[in-house]
Image: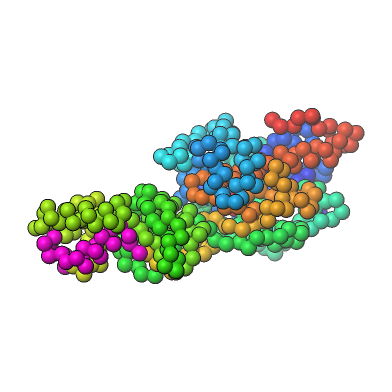
Amino acid sequence: MQKDATAIIIGAGPAGLFLAARLAARLAGRLSPPAGEGVLVLEKMPRPGLKLLASGSGRCNLSHSGPIGDFLGHYGSAGRFLKKSLYAFTNEDLALWLRERGVALEAEEGGKLFPASRRASDVLGVLVDECERNGARVIAGARAVEARREGGAFAVETLAQDGSREAYGAPFLALAAGGRSYPGTGSTGDGYALARALGHAIVDPRPALAPVALRDTAICALAGLSFESLAFSIRRGGRKIDETRGDLLITHEGLSGPGILDASRGFEPGDILELDFSGLGLERFKAALDSRIAASPRALARTAMADLGLPRRLAELACSLAGLPEEARCSDLRREAREAMARTAAAFPAEIKAVGGFEKAMVTAGGVSLGEVDGSSMESRIAEGLYFAGELLDYDGDTGGYNLQAAFSTAEAAARAMAQAACGLFPPGSTMPPPRATILP
Ligand SMILES: Cc1cc2nc3c(=O)[nH]c(=O)nc-3n(C[C@H](O)[C@H](O)[C@H](O)COP(=O)(O)OP(=O)(O)OC[C@H]3O[C@@H](n4cnc5c(N)ncnc54)[C@H](O)[C@@H]3O)c2cc1C
């Protein structure tokens, strides 16, 4: 027997939960559900919000404190699509909504916004509580395997782990099933197939915000070492194609950290990153090294390097890569050795072997094609009554809270439009209470 609902939302990540809570809050007291079930959230995993719990290493960098206009440039060309939803529900609106529910936010240096407790579980707790308080029901362990149009409504079938199936129907359906990255959290790309079945084109999903593995792993001896705002250029086929800066972390396989993750969207295997650990650039570093050597010829070479501001382990690696013994002194250094040491410090060539796949990428680029979705309401331009929210859409943002803010803003836009449509569908004279002229709280 099919269970009927007012609206079905597929996916209980931040987008799906926020959408459900906001939609149910708007409908509460204004609309009785047509047949028993009101707003339903179907979640395939045993628990909602697993990726949210992992976000920001469990600390949840859920937005950024900068002006909302500055957000747009952090999503590449998708910024234009996101503009309306971001302006309609800003970082300040999100902070206020959470604060009113007991979760204060704090900005860290650079503007990243976190819950003051630094616990993602506090944010998830509010989302789940708000669903419950407003009467939206989250059904966990229910994987949506099929969604189709049936008359003027949508029919959704779910499959539970024990193999049992359920059928649901509703005049409104929202897909918020996330992307394909970190599949262990439940986001395995199911949403693309569901959207496709309902007539939508999918822009090829690709891993984004991913760490890189290096071909030569000599630098990985320094795993754990991190650098703030490190300048690096990207060379492809012998040509410099870009230069940027950002925080960088050396890992056991290669490089990570926000600066690398953000830039990884443009990397290809074989690209060479020239890393300036010195902050001086190659020519100025060479000049500084020459002066240092002239001033203290008896100093150890590795001490001279460290004196120029390099971390000691990097100074030692630079000497060893230049073929110097540990006790080499400045007076022993030939031109080639100085050149090699300066290159490690100020233009270290790190060749990319691979850019992390979906297992390691924080987000997915690609997804439901934005041209087929209305950027104000998140409603499909192809199937009336179908909405989208979150990472399933073809956007991906930089690190710094931009991805979660987009999930919340798109969810809010969908919730507002779905509430308006639901009230319009059950006008005065039907069994439903009449909609108010303004239904926004
Ligand atoms: C390790 C990590 C750290 C991150 N840190 C940050 C950060 O600090 N700041 C930031 O802004 N972003 C961060 N992100 C990205 C951010 O978490 C995502 O962009 C965000 O979670 C997307 O929200 P969503 O609701 O659209 O999708 P998701 O969070 O992926 O949720 C989708 C939900 O849908 C469910 N689902 C999928 N298919 C089905 C189906 N067939 N039936 C039912 N349910 C289904 C999934 O199980 C999942 O629960 C991080 C990501 C990762 C992996």
Figure quadrant of the C terminus:
top right
Tell me residue 157's x, y (percent). 75, 58
Main SS of the magenta part reads: helix
Eyeballing the image, is 54 above or below 204?
above
Q: How many marks?
A: 0
At 63% from the left edge and 63% from the top edge, which residue is drawn?
Answer: 204
Decide if residue 42 is on the left or right side of residue 279.
Answer: right
Tell me residue 291's x, y (percent). 17, 53
Report the front residue among 77 and 5.
77
At 63% from the left edge and 54% from the top edge, which residue is drawn?
Answer: 394
Q: Is residue 289 magenta?
A: no
Tell me residue 420's x, y (percent). 77, 38
Tell me residue 2's x, y (percent). 81, 54
At 42% from the left edge and 55% from the top edge, which residue is drawn?
Answer: 243
Decide if residue 315 is on the left or right side of residue 293.
Answer: right
The answer, for residue 289, to whether it is visible in the render is yes
Q: Dividing the picture into quarters, in which one does residue 71 lie?
A: top right
At 19% from the left edge and 65% from the top edge, which residue is drawn?
Answer: 335
Figure quadrant of the N terminus:
bottom right
Q: Is residue 348 magenta?
A: yes
Q: Dividing the picture into quarters, in which one does residue 367 lie?
A: bottom right
Report the front residue among 422 and 226.
226
The answer, for residue 194, to whether it is visible in the render is no
Q: In the rendered structure, which segment of residues is drawn in magenta?
A: 325-349
